[in-house]
Each structure stands twice: as structure tokens, then as C-alpha cells.
Image (spheres, grey):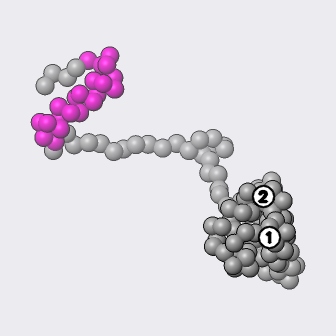
Amino acid sequence: MAYSVKDFLDWIPGSGGIISTIAKRAQCDWRTANKYINEHPTLKAAYDAECETMLDLAESTVLKAIKDGDTADAKWYLTKKGKRRGYGDTMELTGEGGGPIKTENKTTLDLSRLTDDELRTLRTLRAKANPDAPADAG
């Protein structure tokens, strides 16, 4: 079926930016609707505007919930919109005085448990990694 830009301009509003809804209105496959929208700048602009409208609606709903005292929505909103004030999804951990966190690596390798082949491999790798180091006698 041949579609016109005008047809799609009628099918996009009220779709919520859901491609499958637009495809259902057009009586076509999801891929066909998606391709058509992306190939026509006018349709892409209309589709993007529909998506922005839905974001505005969602944001309005969250703001209303916050005004009604919903602390979970308020916390979520702060992690998304309050980053410049120090709110966010991640934490930055620092050491003493805001400096780096000091760590120690106390892992040791018991070489007595390795086979002769494993020891030779380790020596070869060590030599490649640090060619100026003296070779072990053994």
C-alpha cells in the first residue's frame, strides 16, 4: 500500500510516540511505519513532537505527585533534575580529606603449587613485561 505524508501526519498525534500504534493505524508492519517516519523529515519532526508531548505529560504527572507529597517521586525527580545541586544516581567516594581512597593488595601467589610448565610460562611473561629485570636462576 502506498502511504502519503499527510496520512502519517494524521496517524502520529495521540500515538504517544509508539511506533506500533502508528503502524496499527496505518495497517502496516512496525518496520514499515518506522522506516516511513525516518525517511520523511516532516514526519520525523511530527513524531519527535509527539514524543516530547508525552515527556511533558509524564513530567507533569510526576510534578503533581510531588506536590501531593509523594516522596518516592520526589527522590526520583531529584536524581534526574537535581544533579547540579548534588543529587544523583551515583555516589562519589573519597578518602581522607577528599583525597583518593588508599588500598592495599595483599594477594600473594603460592608458587609451590604451580607445575614446571606454569612456572616457565610465568618466567616468560615476566621477561616480556619487564625485559630489564634480571632473570631468575631456576
Rendered residue at 63%/67% (across/down): 31
Rendered residue at 28%/28% (across/down): 126
Residue bearing the label numbered 2: 40
Q: Report the side of 104 relative to 93 (left or right).
A: left
State which quarter of the image contains the C terminus: top left
In the foreground, 11 or 96: 11
Give amino acid for label 1.
Phe
In the foreground, 31 or 127: 31
Residue bearing the label numbered 1: 8
Q: CA distance from mark 1 to mark 2?
A: 10 Å
Q: Is residue 31 visible?
A: yes
In the foreground, 41 or 6: 6
Of pointers 1 and 2, the one earlier in the residue sequence: 1
State which quarter of the image contains the N terminus: bottom right
Rendered residue at 23%/28% (across/down): 124
Rendered residue at 48%/44% (across/down): 103
Q: Secondary structure at mark 2?
A: loop
Q: Secondary structure at mark 1?
A: helix
